Amino acid sequence: MKRTTVTLPDDLHSRVEREAKRNGVSASEVVRNALAEHFGTNGRKKELSFAAIGRSGTTEDAAAKADEILAREWTRDRLFYGGP
């Protein structure tokens, strides 16, 4: 494991410290978990709300019907697991 120094604004530092105390872990653990969550390295697939936004896969007027197409095609499985 490598050591890194990070400078935080006072309000963010306070939030990290509170979270660490609330969970009985170190501030370093809170920051590691937050970074792992952000970068998707915690074993879970990261949801990308904008994935394939330009590819509708249809000949419909995608710009005019974007909400309708997304509601029909974007299932939870597709968002999290990159299904067809």
Image (cartoon, rainbow, N blue to C red):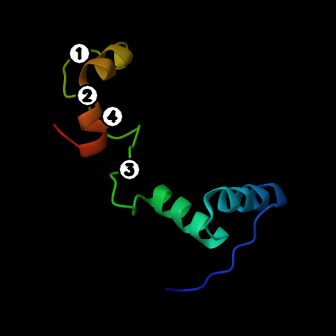
Residue 55 is situated, as x and y percent measured from the top left of the image, at 27, 33
Among the two numbered marks 4 and 3 on one chain, the one whose residue lies closer to the N terminus: 3
Please report the residue visible at 55 percent of the width from the left and 59 percent of the height from the top: 34
Contact between labelled residues 3 and 1, with CB atoms less than 8 Å apart: no
Contact between labelled residues 2 and 4, with CB atoms less than 8 Å apart: yes
Contact between labelled residues 3 and 4, with CB atoms less than 8 Å apart: no
Q: Amino acid at mark 3?
A: Lys
For mark 4, give the secondary structure.
loop
User: Nearest the camera: 36 or 30?
Assistant: 30
For mark 2, give the secondary structure.
loop
Among the two numbered marks 1 and 4 on one chain, the one whose residue lies closer to the N terminus: 4
Decide if residue 26 is on the left or right side of residue 33: right
Q: Which residue is mark 1?
A: 60
Query: In which image quadrant can residue 80 be found?
Result: top left
Q: Which residue is mark 2?
A: 56
For mark 1, give the secondary structure.
loop
CA separation in Å, label 3 and label 2 = 21 Å
On residue 54, the disc is 4
Residue positioned most to the right? 10
